Amino acid sequence: MAHIRILQGRFEEALDWASQSHSVSPSNAITHSMLAAANAFLGRRAEAARWVDALRKISPETTFASIRRGCQMMRDQRQVEVVIEGLRLAGMSED
């Protein structure tokens, strides 16, 4: 749901959904990505950067390339690129 809300530009709702997910599964890398992206899109860069740091700790192998590979089956790759853009805004680097 967080990803869908990000795609819709409903970032506060995305943050709510991702926060709920984090409370149930605090080591889920996708949840960390959603928390970082939603915060970044809301202009909360420090909080977004904190989530990127947490993502790097729990999943150091996560890169933009690995995210794209993991989402290859999505019909519309723009759905992936929106999250990647949020992660860029949050301070995640390409490597």
Image: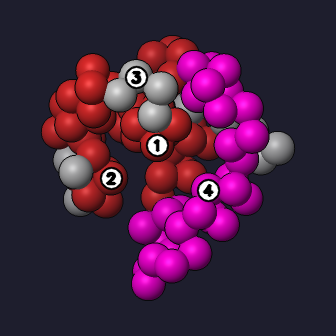
Q: Which residue is mark 2?
A: 3
Q: Is residue 73 left or right of residue 21?
A: right
Closer to the eye: label 3 or 4 = 3
Up-down relation of residue 7 to residue 12 (above or below): below
Look at the image and give the residue range highlighted in magenta.
52-81
Looking at numbered disc 4 in the image, what kind of residue is underneath it? Answer: Ile
Q: Which residue is mark 3?
A: 26
Q: Which residue is mark 1?
A: 30
Closer to the eye: label 2 or 3 = 3
Which x, y percent locates residue 69?
66, 66
Which residue is painted at 50% across and 63% down in the image?
Answer: 80
Looking at numbered disc 3 in the image, what kind of residue is underneath it? Answer: Pro
- Badge 4 or badge 2: first in the primary sequence: 2
Distance Cα–Cα, label 3 vs label 4 = 19 Å
Q: At numbered mark 4, what does the secondary structure look like: helix, strand or loop?
A: helix
Marks 3 and 4 close (CB-CB < 8 Å): no
Which x, y percent locates residue 11?
26, 41
Q: Residues within 10 Å of mark 3 (few under 14, many from 20)?
A: few
- Badge 2 or badge 1: first in the primary sequence: 2
Q: Residue furthest right?
A: 95
The kind of secondary structure the magenta stretch mainly shows is helix
